Amino acid sequence: MLVVTAICLLALIADTGKKPGLTGWLVEGAFLLGALRAIRLLWLFGMLRARNTIMSWPS
């Protein structure tokens, strides 16, 4: 998330025109990267929870 935050902050600093141009593309890329990382973390925690459930079943 630090990378996404840094890209957004740099885009805010660099944005001086009325049209977004390259800065807009960088922000959209950062948002996409953040969303993909969030989905990956949700999947990972779901896998850990499923494994923990299976391991706690009585034999």
Image (cartoon, rainbow, N blue to C red):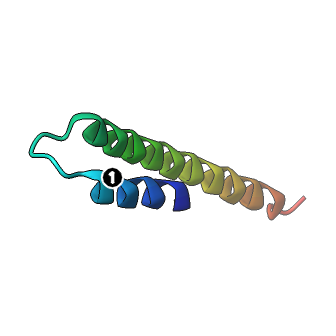
Q: Position of residue 30 (x, y in %)?
A: 41, 46
Amino acid type, mark 1: Ala
Location of the C terminus (image quadrant): bottom right
Q: Position of residue 3 (x, y in %)?
A: 53, 55
Considering only vertical position in the picture, is 22 above or below 1? above
Give the residue at x 9% y 45%: 18
Q: Which image quadrant is residue 19 in?
A: top left
The secondary element bearing badge 1 is classed as helix
Q: Which image quadrant is residue 13 in?
A: bottom left
Q: Position of residue 44 (x, y in %)?
A: 64, 51
Give the residue at x 30% y 52%: 14
Q: Which residue is mark 1?
A: 11
Q: Is residue 1 left or right of residue 44?
A: left
Residue closest to the eye, 25 or 10: 10
The local crowd at label 1, few if under 14, some if 14 to 19, many if 20 or more residues have their Cα within 10 Å, is: some
Q: Is residue 41 left or right of residue 27?
A: right
Q: Residue furthest left?
A: 18
Residue closest to the eye, 45 or 19: 19
Residue closest to the eye, 32 or 39: 32
Give the residue at x 32% y 41%: 28
Give the residue at x 37% y 61%: 9
Number of callouts in the render? 1
Residue closest to the eye, 23 or 36: 23
